[in-house]
Amino acid sequence: MSFFHPLIPLVCCALGAAIAAAHGLTPINRLVPTRIYGWVVAAFPMAAFISLVGMADQLFQGQMKAIVFQQPWIPGLATDEGSGISFSIYLDGLSILFALLITGIGVLVTVYTGYYFSGTKTAWRFATYMCLFMVSMLGVVVAGDLILLFVFWEATSITSFLLIGYKGESEAARRGAFKSLFITGGGGIALLVGLLMISMITGTFSLGEVLTQGDVIQASPLYPWLLALVVLGCITKSAQVPFHTWLPDGMTAPTPASAYLHSATMVKAGIYLLARLHPSLGDSDLWFWSLTSIGAVTMVTGAWLGVRQTDLKALLAYSTVSQLGALVMLIGQKADIAFKALAVGILAHALYKSALFMLAGIVDHETGTRDLRKLGGLRAKMPRTAIVAMVAGLSMAGLPPMFGFLAKETMLAMVAHPSLPDVLVFLLSSAAVVAGALIFCQAAILVLGTFFGSSRDQETFDHAHDAPWGMLLAPLLPALLSLLIIIPVSTWPVELLGAAAQSVYGEKVKIDLSLWHGLNTALLLSIIAVSIGTTLFLARRRFIALQHRLDPGPVCNALYRGSILGIDGSSWLVTRVQNGYLRMYLLIMFVGLGIMVLVAGLPPLPTRLPPLRLDDGWVLVRVVAIALATAAAVSTVLLKRDLYAILALGASGLAVAVLFLLIPAPDVALVMIVVDILMLVILVLALVRFPKPQREGADELDYQETWLGKWRDGLVSAGVGLATALAMLFVLVTRPDPAGLGEIAWERESRVTDFFFAAAKPLTGAADVVGAILIDFRATDTYLEIMVFALAGAGVYTLLRFASPAAGDDATDAAPADLQANRGPGASFWPVAESPLTRLLALLILPLSLMLALAHVLFGHDQPGDGFTAGVVASLAVAFWYIILGYEGVHRTLPWLRPMNFVGGGLSLGIVVAIMGAIFNQNAFSPVNFALMLGITTPYGISLSTGLMFEVAIFLAVLGGATLVIDTLGHPRDRDTESDRQATLLPVLEARGDVTSPLEDEDEDDSHAASVARED
Amino acid sequence: MIVQTWSQHVVALPVAFPLAGCALTALVFRRNRRWQGLTAVAFMALGLISSTLLLGDVLISGEPRVFHLGGWPAPFGIALAGDLLGATMAFMCQIVLLGGVVYGVGCRDKCAQFPTFFPFFLALAAGLTGSMLTTDIFNLFVFAEVVVIAGTVLTAISDDRKGTEAAFKYFYISQFAAMALLVACGTLYAAYGTLNMADLARLIEQTPYHPLLPFAMVLLLVSFMIKSAVMPFHFWQPDFHTAAPTPVHAVLSSVVVKLGIYGFMRMTTLLFIEPEAKALIENTLIVCGCAGVIFGGLGAAGTYDAKRMLAYSTLGQLGFILVAVGWGTPLAMAAAIIFAFNHSLAKAAMLMLAGAVASRAPVKTAAFDRIVGLGRLRPVAGILFLFGGMALAGLPPTNGFISKLAVLQSGVEAGQWLPLAVLAAASIITLVYVARAFQTIWLKPIPEGVEPKPYGDQLLAPFALVAGCLALGLYAQPLVELAILNSQWMLESRQEYIDAVIGTMSEAQDRIQELSP
């Protein structure tokens, strides 16, 4: 056997999926009808089946326990012991049994699908999903790695979701699909955690090794938890009470999917996994009691609920639930006969149930309905179908000589096993008998109600006709097998079932397939069950009426609905928190910050105040500046008129600038002053654009706040402010000044200051340390800062000139020509008295300020002031021109003023500076002195260097950014339309009680969420 | 100045290319959108190439690449350092950023036609990449400001009328974050006299009980929490991300929010390794992460708009990463990296797909009731959305499963049962909203009377991203290994990072001697 042999089945099925998908290609789709294509695709699972038969033979002959294949997959995600996740295959008796069922029934279902969708051009999608499911399901049963198993496990959930929701137009199909995904997916998460726990305890992901470490796992304190999680995963998948509700709802899938996934294979994944892990998790009391109780309850519930169904598929679905319950119960047992019953039961159920499902599909297909109330007497119209149905129905009813009889007998023998406590024998026997009787009744209703008696709906009856042989072949084969498997033509079935039971039980289990075991308890119980079942069938009308009377309502469905409603309800609550009020957001954030600061530890109170210098003769100025800064800052909050508040803000800034000047920090003071003025100008210009009522409306808001709200907000702000102030105070007094520190002696000497002072002149040639820091040492910061500045300007420009609904002005750098229509040439935009004097002033100021800017750019490196100041000063003058001359006036007289080009040019020049450094010094952003390089002496201390270039770049970017803002604010068309729009919006905003409207629509449409949550 | 080799410049290239692209597209091609778009794509692609080179270089040499800008050695100048974490993060960001630019070129939004769209986008890219490569905390602040201003503008100009308001809120709250970060910078500088993170790390280790340190730490933490939209500092995020134009939303919600995650990793593994402080950060992350997981999941399940759903979903998914960072074990840190990487790809792809569907709606919107069944017009997008959704919900065979697996595994290993239970429960909620969205958009029939637009956004970028999701799901080992190397680097090679950036103590002294005139 070659190394890759174990992969063949998986590869075959995957190829099948690819071939099925190929039918979606138009030429193939036209050429080959769906019916024929079904046969083509079926060849691939057939190949898989044959290769599996070969492997099974080897397994039976050879002495090895399992066929193993192993390749590392994600070795990185390893356990402590270093064993990683691998792509491995573990094929033993149990796997082979399941794999044969999956591929075998897969072949039949694929052929059947072709007939079922005969004439439908888009069926390739369905066939592809089916083949993908086949790969996943096969993967589940052959995977030799816990995580790989889980991967395939989830893949079956997803393909099942797609198949159930195949008819997506139908509401029921979507709901069924969602429900199945929710329940099986939820169980999947639990399973994953459970499997991870197992791998942590055993130190391996390999299934083969996990199976040998049962005692280690069961000794772990985590055992109850991991058992619960794994069992939860399995019982959701295998539709055990109370999670069974997805299975009947999943019947909205096209019948081939129901026959394949929801009877024969996927729902048995849980059974498989429980059986698979039995050697390592099983045999404990917890295992016994949990599985026995869940299984027994499910067995009875499914049987009970199935009888009253009127839909053929729903009836079959409930009987499937019941059978799965029986299997789970069997896995829980400790005696060897249970595992014989398990193996026989799995095979028997898969055979007859898939046959019956496909028959139900045929009936549906050929009569147009599967409602039992409309069917009846079809024997006459569909004789072939009726015969096959009777054979399969006999097996379901558990009558001899069918395989189903054997399965039931073995199970009955188990529940009456002497190893069980007496009480349990009684309970389980009664449960099994009741379930057996009900299933018998179901089988009778199903077969007799459909094919015998008289027709209940003439139209349906007339419409009916028998199925083509090809379609009938699919149910015929499993039905015949249920009949023939007990005839001892070969030891093969016995060996297969024996091997399967052995891998679950761990020791050899004796299997014999003879029907007659003598007159024993099991036979007795069986006879009782059949007689009760017959009685029930004969009195079915009254019995079903009784059932309806006893019905407690959809209890388990309520569980599902409850959790969905819970999710939706809490979702609703959660989205309420996101209410759109910035005030509240900030409040929560500040409180959160406060709590975190308190938890982490507040900075200690400083032991002394920072010294106020009194000896330099500037005391009065300093005191006045501090007072002014404080008073102005407070006024910004208290002042009601926005214009005054802005002016106060400006005053506060200027006062701070004075303080900086006295430190002395002339660079900072200079920047502070120009930026302060620019900010004032922009704010005031922006204010002009707001319509008056809106500005007053904003004031009104202040009064609408309750006194409680005011106090709350005030306290929080004060708290945050105070904490910050304290921290800053501490920062101030712990400046290098050891005397003021008392005993605290931290190393606080700045590591960098000394270096800057010492190195500025010799290394960068800058006489001004601040200039050296800005242009050289931290040039990147400077570049990014001007970028932020320029981008902010470009942002205002883009927002108002392009994105504003009124803008409609798509021309970049709008040409003044197209504005002539709106306003007379030269008309001043802002209502400022235009006089010869103001014009003269404007004409004078611009050249002056440009000269000032030039000086700053040229000497910025050595003197206070730099390109930034230069840019702001120049843009202030430009702003003045806008005010005096108006938008068109400026554009006419200053054609060189292209702010976007300045921005782009400035930013590009900055990059060029960096590149220069790289070219000449092999150090991007390093200073290059061209004058020195070329041997030129420059006059007046002007340096011809990258420093100068960088200053120019800063100047351009800042001028561009600031001018963009002013230009945008001055654009006449914007102003009018913008104001109009806002004026119309105002009443709406006022009605909401806030200028910032909440984004979350109050009447948001929850209909979608609700529609999925609603249940029948 | 110190002498540096050309290969050291590689560190600067991932930042330099988008920066240059931003400057250039702002200067030329403003009226020719096609050329502007292609230039942007070209520069972004160059950025991605260089960050790939950087990552490869770091992986091969096993040590960080450090570039002292202008030749001024840290801590005097600003140094960019491509250590394994930074390089990985930059690489991750640039993959998605390139996807975003490509999507922007094929995007039919009005705002994507504006002449300043691409400059802003590239500025965002440069800012984000720079934040992850810089070693200077003030430089980080400035890079983050570039991200904020670019993000604000890009959202404010969105076709969505709510964009301006959302941008205003974001800007306001970001100023709070900026203030916190700035005060933190100031406080740290006052306490330790340096702004370089490597230098700070060494000094903090020497004197870990400075009275100002807890204050600075909390401010730093809060500013990163705002950046990554961590509960309860997340309020800006759902509104802001929903209103952003699709290509911008795709990068905002996937990689820009990872800036804070990066910050947390630096905090717990570089700056604050003293057990008490570290525990405080980690516990905060776990608690806030769990809250975010629940809040984001429920919010996503309860909202009415596909893009908003995905925005909320980001809150939830970030929670997973936060919890993993909070656990802090080697496996958990690796899981955090894996999760961050995979989430970036999947979330960006999902948003692009949602946006592409929305672009077919008669009036552009992603509200569920307006895009019912519109996916039927684009079955390919449906397949992509399905896989992307699976990645988001953590289902195999996508990369999302690998992330979820890694996080849960690290949780099991760490024995953190309560957070683990929260994460597991939240995974189910993820399943709920993804499945609902898929059914609404792709399975439901188109209501009568709806006339979709004949064209929509191009699907190239989401196609590539989903292909990446699948590839990393089927063959996860390379990413897992990269993440494990990252985790080892973070947890074990702290000193190497410090030495690489500022040199050993004596080297630093020598450097000062050598430079001082």
Image (cartoon, rainbow, N blue to C red):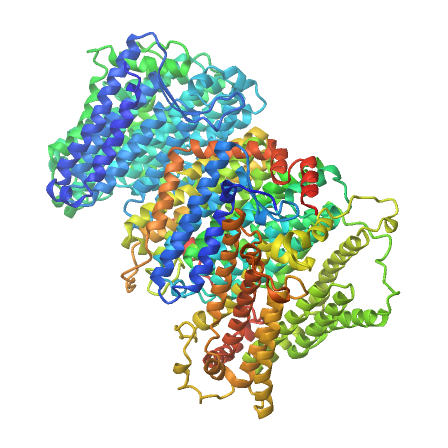
Decide which of A325, A36 is in the foreground and name it.
A36
Question: Looking at the picture, how far across and down is residue B376, in whole percent?
Answer: 28, 53
Q: Nearer the viewer, residue B162 or A876?
A: A876
Left/right placement of residue A582 relative to residue B150 reads right
Residue B236 drawn at (x, y percent): 55, 58
Q: How many marks?
A: 0
Q: Residue at x 87, y 44 (%)?
A: A743
Vertical relation: A585 (above or below) A435: below
Using the rendered image of the protein, determine whether residue A520 is visible from the camera's viewpoint: yes
Residue drawn at the location 65% of the way across and 51% of the way down: A763
Judge whether residue A180 can be spotted in this image: no
Seen as rendered, the residue at the extreme bottom is: A836
- Image position of A895 (left or right of A68): right
The quarter of the displayed image where residue A341 is located: top left
**x, y (%) of residue A54?**
24, 16
| Looking at the image, residue B171 lies above or below residue A680 | above
Q: Is residue A195 above or below residue B124?
A: above
- Between residue B289 and residue B479, name the one nearer to us: B479
Q: Is residue A655 left or right of A871 when viewed as pictured?
A: right
Measured as percent of width and height from the top left, residue B447 is found at 30, 60
